[in-house]
Image (tube, rainbow, N blue to C red):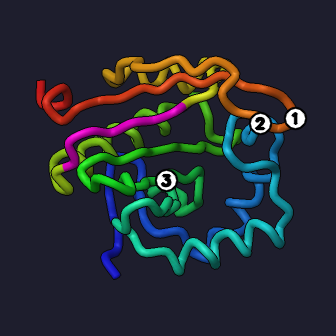
Amino acid sequence: MEKLNIITQRLNIRHLELADLPDFHIYRSNPEVTKYQGFDVMTLEQAEAFIKMNTKRQPWKAGEWVQYAIENKGTGKLIGDCAIKLNQDDVRIAEIGITISHLEQKRGYAKEALLAILKFLFEEKEIHRVVETVDAENIASINLLKSVGFRQEGHFVENIFFKGKWGSEFQYAMLKREWDI
């Protein structure tokens, strides 16, 4: 299996491991962190099962989300995770997502990780297009996407019944040629 290992100034983006469980559970069990996510708060057992299931997934398999660890190089601690999924019908299109622990937010880690993932996808994997769908109320994520050059392509109004209510989403995207500018 091809191991992902993206190194930035402060981060190591790598495969999620069972040793990450304590740090993973800290933020995955926080309702503020999961508020706009496609998952809900996790018990320790659910977090462990998720990591075990994720280790069996095949990176770069069309249609399959794979979660990766975002590790602080200085401390060796997990500070978040990111996900990459290649489009089921065209593997030149990728969808991504990033979650940063509530204990580590507002330090530029999400932007650093996002830029490194984009560089990897566009320059090494030769991806043509990267998309991210975000809750219309998730202002921090929207601002992050705009700050690195994503453009809004769609606004889906009450398109998803999510955590007990109808929610709206935006879709943002970036093409490789936009990254190359």
Q: Position of residue 60 (x, y in %)?
A: 34, 66
Q: Is residue 161 magenta?
A: no
Residue 64: give x, y in percent of width and height: 47, 63
Q: Helix, strand or loop at disc 1?
A: loop
**Which residue appears at 50% of the width and 51% of the height?**
82
Coordinates of residue 101 in the picture (x, y in percent) = 66, 45
Q: Position of residue 40 (x, y in %)?
A: 79, 48
Prevailing SS of the magenta stretch: strand
Amino acid tagged 2: Phe
Q: Nearer the viewer, residue 101 or 47?
A: 47
Question: Hey, what amino acid is under mark 3?
Answer: Ala
**Nearer the N terminus, badge 3 or badge 1?**
3
- Residue 68 seen in the figure: no
Q: As displayed, is residue 96 above or below residue 91?
A: above
Q: Residues within 10 Å of mark 1 (few under 14, many from 20)?
A: few
- Which comes sooner in the sequence, label 2 or label 3? 3
Which portion, as a residue range, is magenta? 127-133
What number is the disc on residue 162? 2
Tag shown at residue 95 = none
Residue 146, placed above or below residue 101:
above
* Label disc, if present, on residue 83 of the rendered structure: 3
